[in-house]
Amino acid sequence: MDWQQLANAMQGYWPHLVLAISVGASVLATIHIAMTKQDVKSAIGWVAVVIFSPLLGAIFYLFAGINRVRQKRLSAQREMAKHELAVMERLIARDLSDYADPHLDALRTLGNNVCENELLNGNRVEILDSGDETYPAMLEAIASARQCIVLQSYIFDHDAIGIKIAQALIDANNRGVQVRVLIDAVGAKYSSPPITRLLKGSGIAVARFLPTAIGIRLVYTNLRSHRKLLVVDGSLALAGGMNIRSGFMIEFAGDNRANDTHFKVTGPIARQLMNSFAHDWEFTTGESLPTTPWFEYTPQALSGDDVTPARVVPSGPDRTMGSNQSMILGALSVARHHVRIQSPYFLPDMVLMAALVTAARRGVVVDVLIPGHNNLKLVGAAMEAQLELLIKDGVRVWRTSGAFDHSKLLTVDNQWSYVGSSNIDPRSLRLNFELDLEVYSRALANHLSQRIDTKIAQGKLVTLAELQAVPFLVRLRNRLIWLVSPYL
């Protein structure tokens, strides 16, 4: 029987065949969802997609719903030499009495159980204000490099400042410094041509994190690397929330400059940042970075009131799933006086909302600062839909005035800070790879608190009356968008 005869024989049975394939695919997808998803809301959502969109739903889940990120430990978690282990052992922070009140010591215990990185003494963490301070600090650090540089970013635009930083990396490479650059595959598409083309053409080792099947930029794509860091010679690092874009500099954007916050780090946690990069680099490229020169660390004799215990907290849809959410929940549970949060994309799930409300009900002042106008319209609408749930129970929500602010900051009782790349939304807390710093420092927390308070003084308090005065159709639209907020 040839193919034509087979096709003729099957002609009357194809609807039954399609039905069988559809049912089989739906059953297999549902089983996979039930056995692998850890969040019940996510599982229910995907089951609904699979059931109510026969075959198409299963195909969509195959490409968009399965976490293909490997969970095994890669070799980037290095075996240190004995003398290095001894140095690091002496740096572990066990007494925080000089840096924070006793009730915050519980956060150290939490961090020890949530994160593989130890809380280490002897770090200096300096605030960098938006691109006008961050990018010159990057250029200076790159110019000072003698052995190695790693740079990781979600967005690295091919624009005025992007070209400057790319040229600095190229110059370093030409003088014999080893350079590795890792850019998220979606973030790389934010400018055309991508900066990767310039870097590769100049001999820089550059890679894109988790390339997507679709060759276009999708704003709401998941499993992205949202981490931003630069490490030079294993001891100097910059990390935080800043991408590389000229829109964050007055020189190029003028009065329309967007705001953000980044941090310059010196001390032993620079090695923790290097370790995070090496893990992502090996996952992406298969190259295991050797101990020399990438993991060499020379202890520095830092002194002064701004030298403080800190640790790096990586999180993502792998073995570090939920680390950032656990740290935030812990902070809200131990706070006694004041919690300040600044987030451009503020979509806490019901667990975090309950923690925020509970803190407020305990008498803690909880201030949340969000943008007056959001650059992601759907996220902004979903944020609006849930503000009433917080405000009616005592959480104070403020809108910023002026340019969009991309900062991600959290302080507790003016003593503990949690800063970095994580937003307070489902994507950052469960779906993307993030990198944050936990810092015990009254000086840093006070400085960040003052920055937030200044924004609050210039902003506007959101009230129930204001929210209830919004036209019904707008509120309905916001609530409908809020229903899909776990996927925004």
Image (spheres, rainbow, N blue to C red):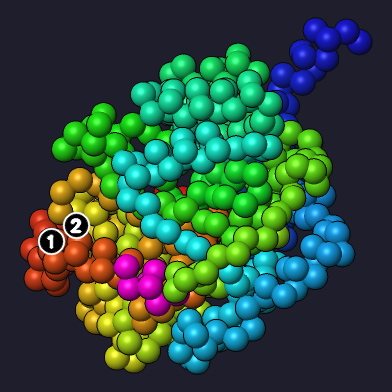
In the rendering, at what x and y percent does residue 309 appear?
55, 73
State the residue at coordinates (38%, 63%): 409
Residue occupying the far right of the picture: 1
Tell me where the magenta segment starts and ends, as one range.
441-447
State the residue at coordinates (88%, 8%): 2
State the residue at coordinates (68%, 26%): 176
Query: Can you say whether 134 is above or below 30 in the image?
Result: above
Q: Residues within 10 Å of mark 1 (few under 14, many from 20)?
A: some
In the rendering, at what x and y percent does residue 126 appear?
42, 59
Residue 233, quarter of picture:
top right
Residue 310 visible in the current orientation: no
Marks 1,2: beta carbons within 8 A: yes
In the rendering, at what x and y percent does residue 135 appear?
40, 39
What residue is pinned by disc 1? 458
Query: Can you say whether 52 is above or below 218 in the image?
Result: below
Left or right of 28? Residue 321 is left
Q: Residues within 10 Å of mark 2 (few under 14, many from 20)?
A: many
Q: 51 or 303: nearer the eye?
A: 303
What residue is pinned by disc 2? 400
Q: Is residue 444 magenta?
A: yes
Residue 40, quarter of picture:
bottom right
Q: Is residue 3 magenta?
A: no
Amino acid type assigned to the residue bearing label 1 in the image: Gln
Q: 72 or 331: nearer the eye?
A: 331
Quadrant in the picture for the N terminus: top right
